[in-house]
Image: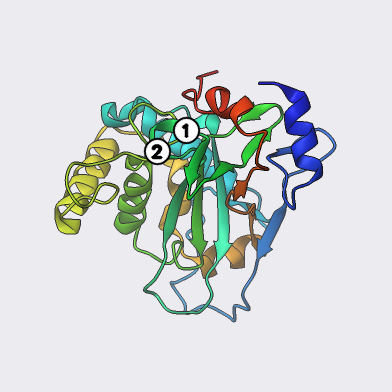
Amino acid sequence: MSTAPCANMEETMAYSLMRSWGYDNSLPIRILRRPVGPRTLGMEAPPWLATGLAGQPFDFCGHMHRLCADVVSRCPSLYHIDVSRLQFGVTAARNGRRHGLQARVTPMRLRDGRLSRRRRGVVYQIQRYFIDGRELLYLVTFCLPRFVDLSFDDKFVTIFHELFHICPSFNGDLRRHDGRYSVHSHSQKQYDRQMSALARAYLASNPQSHLHAFLRLDFGQLVQRHGGIMGVCIPRPKLIPLPPGQTELILEETNRPAARM
């Protein structure tokens, strides 16, 4: 990709086409806390469930990254996923309701892995994110405390639900189904049953228990033990309109499939 046109375009744009973290620019971290009074006897976090040092913020994204790396290594339906090209993150629930967003996967490419598209005569390019020089293809974000307060089984189903959305070509796009509901299948119940079966198969493969021990605790138990839950909090990428007259120089390059590293 030619760097000169991009540099000139970015000078005139409100948002950068590329964002980078690492080295001297650390990822934005948020610590979520909620006042927790004395827990009912018997509802404290079981001491045998290892979640890291007590009194230190719980690293939710680090734990989720390690768990998902093990999940994809044991699940043939997810073998195409390179977890190093995923960034796990957290977002705070807007209210205390139990129903609502639990998690989401955000693709860093458009349909078929493209970086740009033309709409009504204007070419838009999606932002590209890099961490330590490695380009991300997906953001996997969990809504707290809502996700953490799910049951153990529902947490696993949710994790598989999000990972299964990742395109088998691993090109930065989402998995697309036949028919009207291309991203979400036509039957939510059937989809959930499929994800539940994958979760049961994973647990039946006897993974190391410390990888998923944190899923057996709720938000209050984790906060009581660690003082807070720490997670990466980065925004979803924006679609940026490119200046007219310069877009054709980069369309062919930016619409090449995302390369594996």
Name the residue at 57% across, 50% down. 89
Residue 56 in view of the camera: no
In this rendered view, identify the residue nearer to me: 102 or 8. 8
As shown in the figure, which amino acid type bears the numbered disc 2? Arg
- Image quadrant in which the C terminus is located: top right
As shown in the figure, which amino acid type bears the numbered disc 1? Arg
Residue 18, position as x, y percentages in the image: 69, 38
Q: Secondary structure at mark 2?
A: helix
Which residue has dot 2 on it? 111
Residue 69 in view of the camera: yes
Residue 112, position as x, y percentages in the image: 39, 32
Which residue has dot 1 on it? 114
> Would you place residue 38 above or below residue 71 in this image?
below
Asked if residue 65 lies left or right of residue 164, the reply is right
- Image quadrant in which the N terminus is located: top right
> Would you place residue 252 above or below residue 231 in this image?
above
Quarter of the image where one finds residue 202: top left
Q: How many marks?
A: 2
> Would you place residue 216 above or below residue 173 in this image?
below
In this rendered view, identify the residue nearer to me: 41 or 91. 91
Name the residue at 72% across, 50% down. 15
User: Badge 1, how many Cα within 10 Å: few under 14, some, many 20+?
Assistant: many
Asked if residue 258 lies left or right of residue 150, the reply is right
Between the residue at mark 1 and the residue at mark 2, the CA separation in whole angstroms equals 6 Å
Asked if the residues shown at circle 1 and circle 2 are in contact, with their CB atoms under 8 angstroms apart, the answer is yes
User: Badge 2, how many Cα within 10 Å: few under 14, some, many 20+?
Assistant: some
Asked if residue 10 lies left or right of residue 119, the reply is right
Residue 217 badge: none
Residue 119, position as x, y percentages in the image: 47, 48
